[in-house]
Image (spheres, coloured by chain):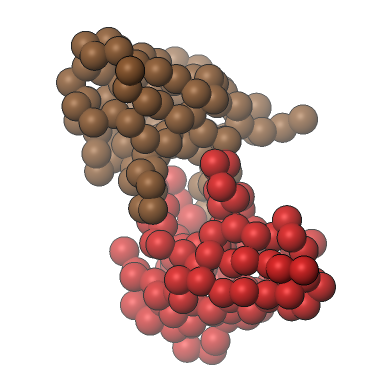
Chain colours: A brown, B red
Amino acid sequence: DGGITQSPKYLFRKEGQNVTLSCEQNLNHDAMYWYRQDPGQGLRLIYYSQIVNDFQKGDIAEGYSVSREKKESFPLTVTSAQKNPTAFYLCASGGDRASNQPQHFGDGTRLSIL
Amino acid sequence: DAKTTQPPSMDCAEGRAANLPCNHSTISGNEYVYWYRQIHSQGPQYIIHGLKNNETNEMASLIITEDRKSSTLILPHATLRDTAVYYCVPYTGTASKLTFGTGTRLQVTL
């Protein structure tokens, strides 16, 4: 069954701790994205990657880091430098105009501070 | 990025058609109109998109005005499972960010 898998569904972070959110896709998409959603607000882009071993900062990259070593995987690390990490994190892949391909989303990871 | 205006909320009786409007008067010529919906605590779900022609798929129909300044998403026979927040999103379709506004909260009732 093709899709985007995010794990874990819920994550708790202690003060000063780094945590990593997983995102895996088996849709053979080149591009992958990380968004953050706060209650009652729209999505904000954190990082995106158009191809393996390459990624760009989005609008709110400070306090976050990513890697793209494999086409299928785009993990996001929320570092201790991110002072307000409590949010709903969404991973997406796709968005290729040439193939008329929309972005598709995973079911998200909800991160909270202990 | 093109700005969108959608009504904050709408109600629809189950089995009836739900017509969700979106104003995108600043849309540029290379931007498609994409529609997504988000059910509480889930990721956004892609519904449909179009450039200037009307489109239909198994989920919905999309009507785009000739001047492309507005569009309407039509769910022909709404069910309770269609209760969600619906977003219209102008997007070039290239690998760049999607900009979601505040959307329309559709409540389908018995």
Image mark count: 0
Vertical order, A9 against B90 (above or below): above
Q: Which residue is at a point 51% across and 38% down the rendered structure image?
A: A92
Q: Is residue A63 left or right of residue A35?
A: left
Vertical order, B72 against B87 (above or below): below
Vertical order, B17 against A28 (above or below): below
Q: Position of residue A39 (x, y in %)?
A: 38, 47
Nearer the observer, B67 or B21: B21
Q: Quadrant of residue B75?
A: bottom right
Q: Is residue A60 left or right of residue B79?
A: left
Q: Position of residue B98 (x, y in %)?
A: 42, 52
Residue A50 appears in the picture as rendered: no
Nearer the observer, A9 or A51: A9
Q: Quadrant of residue A3?
A: top right
Vertical order, B10 against A29 (above or below): below
Task: Quadrant for the N terminus of chain B, please.
Answer: bottom left
Nearer the observer, A95 or A14: A14
Q: Is residue A32 left or right of residue B76?
A: left
Q: Position of residue A25 (x, y in %)?
A: 60, 27
Q: Position of residue B94 (x, y in %)?
A: 45, 51
Residue A58 appears in the picture as rendered: yes
Nearer the observer, A87 or A75: A87
Task: Quadrant for the C terminus of chain B, please.
Answer: bottom right
Q: Which residue is at a point 41% across and 57% down the rendered structure image?
A: B100
As drawn, the residue found furthest toward the bottom would be B66
Q: Which residue is at a point 48% across and 29% down the rendered structure image?
A: A109
Q: Is residue A3 left or right of residue A75?
A: right
Q: Which residue is at a point 53% across and 65% down the rendered structure image?
A: B105
